[in-house]
Amino acid sequence: MGNQWKILVTERIAEEGIEMLKQEADVHVDFELSSDEKRPELLKEIKNYDAIIVRSKTKIDRELFDASENLKVVGRAGNGIDNIEVKEATKRGVVVANTPDSNTISAAELAIGLLIAQSRNISQANTYIKSGKWERNKFKGSELYGKVLGIVGLGRIGSLVATRMQSFGMKVIGYDPYIQDERFKRFNVEKKDALDKLIKESDFISVHTPRTEETMGMIGEDEIEIMKEGVRLVNAARGGIISEQAILKGIKNGKIASAGIDVHEVEPCYDNPLYEYDNVIVTPHIGASTLEAQQNVGVTIANQVISALKGEVVTNAVNLPTLNRDELITTKPYIDLMDKLGGIYYQLYNDPVEKVEISYYGNVARQETDMATIAFLKGLLSPVVGEHVNYVNAKMLAEQRGIALKENKKMDVFNGYTQLITVKVRGKNKTFTISGNLSSKNEGKIVEIEGYEVDVEPSEFMIFVQNIDVPGVIGKIGTTLAIENVNIAKMQVGRNKPGERALMLLNVDDIVSKDTLDALTKVENVIWAKAVRL
């Protein structure tokens, strides 16, 4: 059992999640602390905990942050964060994580189920045959194959629906003004720059946006009027995104062939004029109501909290760019690499940083790179800020130190690399450059540093040596390290021309002492030697 951290759980999560937490930390479960009556006790106790896990009842506000002394992460077992003051958490470097991915598959599958059910009249046929009747021709449906599916909102659930419905042979088009073009391309969705363009072309329309002032009623009578005759609608996102009154009018006049609705403008809903129509299929907000989804919530939030406490990437941190599971598989090697690349500069130079310019080339430029950029800043500041910098506050701390940030994305191959990240760190007196990519084993490596071409996998313990490129230097360095009892795992020299300055990168097995570095600098033709720990 771990006892490095203490975690407080004030609201119910799956037992599987509790057991996972207990493997890593001391866990205290007290559901009563979520009540208003027990609030004073919560404020008194929170100073003892590194993490707290809640649902929607416990208030995580400035008052609680003020009372906490060691809080590093707030875990929300669910999707909403209305009870958490995220900005206040961000100011204090506290990770806020929720579990939006835990029910995405369940929600996407329900939306797809509503699509299929209405296109093939499954609900109506079920009711009809159970009433003691039998008639096949009464339930002539419509195939999905070859039809156009319009998805409004290409976030987690929308992209899952898009991917799955393409396997049905549907053409998928999408509208989401807040999603980059690269994401549309990744999911093979044709992007529409206006909602009305999507509406006019779609045979089926499914909405997957959050409930905001902008999205409430975004599809109303005017939008339905320009839809295709016989359009079919699905709303398994939030009640009111498609106006129920507008759906009712469209059903009555035949403009809408059918609709599938899991969410209502007012819930619970016991009486609704839409219920009178057989071609309207309704369910009581059950998008997340699967055994797997509820287990996933508990397990996922446990993983998120432990990852945050360990200083690792938290995929669902709401005060960070988020990554779904598929994106994490693709981008995590880049994130890990950028954290290490960032950690090198301040261990070599003391020149204050004024600007960081990061350029992504080729395949990596098509990925979500926000977290990779943040990872570089985290690595950059770690040697000077220490444990106080994390993925949440790295960007904010960089801004406070006057470090400007510029990002470039270029899809072209660069210098023969199909994927490459180059970084320029500009100080007052010098510009430091470093570049990296992934090996065939998907491991990060340095391929350029300070203008020297190399091929080095960064390790925890390294030595960087600047020397004059003349015969005998490498041997003398090796001998000196042997005398100092430092074992060399790998060594590579980057040089431009013989006889000029070269840069040697050594992977070693353990931390390097100051005495060892002093011994290296005394070697003839060695200019400087510095230890780097990543």
Image (tube, rainbow, N blue to C red):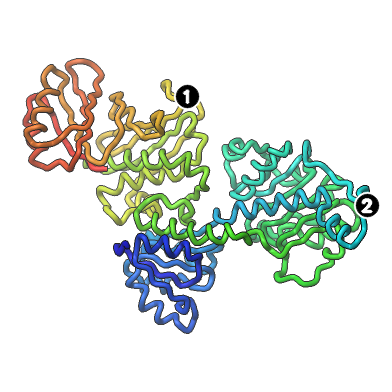
Q: Which residue occupies 47% across, 24% down?
A: 413
Residue 95: image x %, image y %? 41, 59
Residue 488: image x %, image y %? 18, 32
Q: Quadrant of residue 144?
A: top right
Q: Residues within 10 Å of mark 2 (few under 14, many from 20)?
A: few
Q: Which residue occupies 85% across, 57% down?
A: 124
Q: Nearer the viewer, residue 302 or 37?
A: 302
**Is 355 displayed left or right of 100 in the figure?**
left
Residue tagged 2: 135
Which quadrant would the C terminus be assigned to in this image? top left
The amino acid type of the residue labelled 1 equals: Val
Report how far apart the C-alphas of labels 1 and 2 lie in the structure: 61 Å
The amino acid type of the residue labelled 2 equals: Glu
For the question of whether residue 351 can be seen, the reply is no
Q: Are marks 1 and 2 in contact (CB under 8 Å)?
A: no
Q: Nearer the viewer, residue 405 or 255?
A: 255
What kind of element bears circle 1?
Answer: loop
Residue 520: image x %, image y %? 10, 32
Residue tagged 1: 413
